[in-house]
Image (cartoon, rainbow, N blue to C red):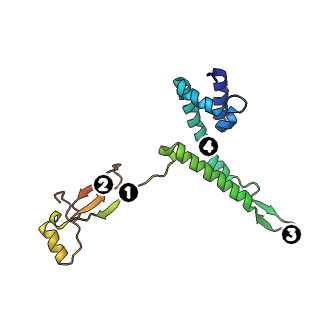
Amino acid sequence: MAYNQETADKVLQGLSEGKSLRKACAGLVDPSYLLRWTEENPEFGQQYMRTRARAYEMLADELVEISDDSTNDTTVTEDGKVVTNQEVVARSRLRVDTRKWMLAKMLPKIYGEKLELAGVVNVKATPADLSDDDLAAIAAGRKLNSLALKVPENTGSDLPTIENCSNGDNNA
């Protein structure tokens, strides 16, 4: 199917309202054709990407709404006892978890898991790599700290550095 601006606009409108791609395309165009249009028409591709990003932001807003909505979470039995409707609570949890997963995958820089690596990991070294002081420390049964792999905290660097952890100088 050839690119059609009117159809493309209708699909983008559906996406901007929070519909899935399949629902936005229903009755208009096959989703695979629409995705091909994004590749063949760079201007439409940019419109599509911006619309999807806005739709994902709306999805993020839904997380709070779903979490705060306690409608039907509990019912009152005939004898006046309040009972939690586990199915409703589980469905709400599933809705939140699905949206969180989608956001983490689609907008990882904003909603993805952030890994922070910090700490000291000892590097195994051969005796030839060790200084006389290090060898003397090993012989004396003391803990060897002169060679260690140190991952700096909060530097934004992905690469660890070798530092002399015992006295702070970098001549190790």
Q: Residue at x 50, y 49 (%)?
A: 112
Mark 3: few/some/many CA within 10 Å (<14, 14-19, 20+): few
Pointer 4 residue:
59
Give how far across and how far down residue 38 sits, in percent: 56, 28
Of the residues tagged 3 and 4, which is closer to the observer? 4
Q: Are marks 1 and 2 in contact (CB under 8 Å)?
A: yes
Q: Are marks 4 and 2 in contact (CB under 8 Å)?
A: no
Q: How far is the residue under mark 1 from the one under mark 2? A: 9 Å
**Tag 4, which secondary structure?**
helix
Indicate which disc, 4 or 1, sits on the residue closer to the N terminus. Answer: 4
Q: How far is the residue under mark 1 from the one under mark 3? A: 55 Å
Pointer 3 residue:
79
* Displayed quadrant of residue 130: bottom left
Task: Tell me, for residue 160, which label it has, or none.
Answer: 2
Amino acid at pointer 2: Pro
Drawn side of residue 62 relative to residue 145, left or right: right
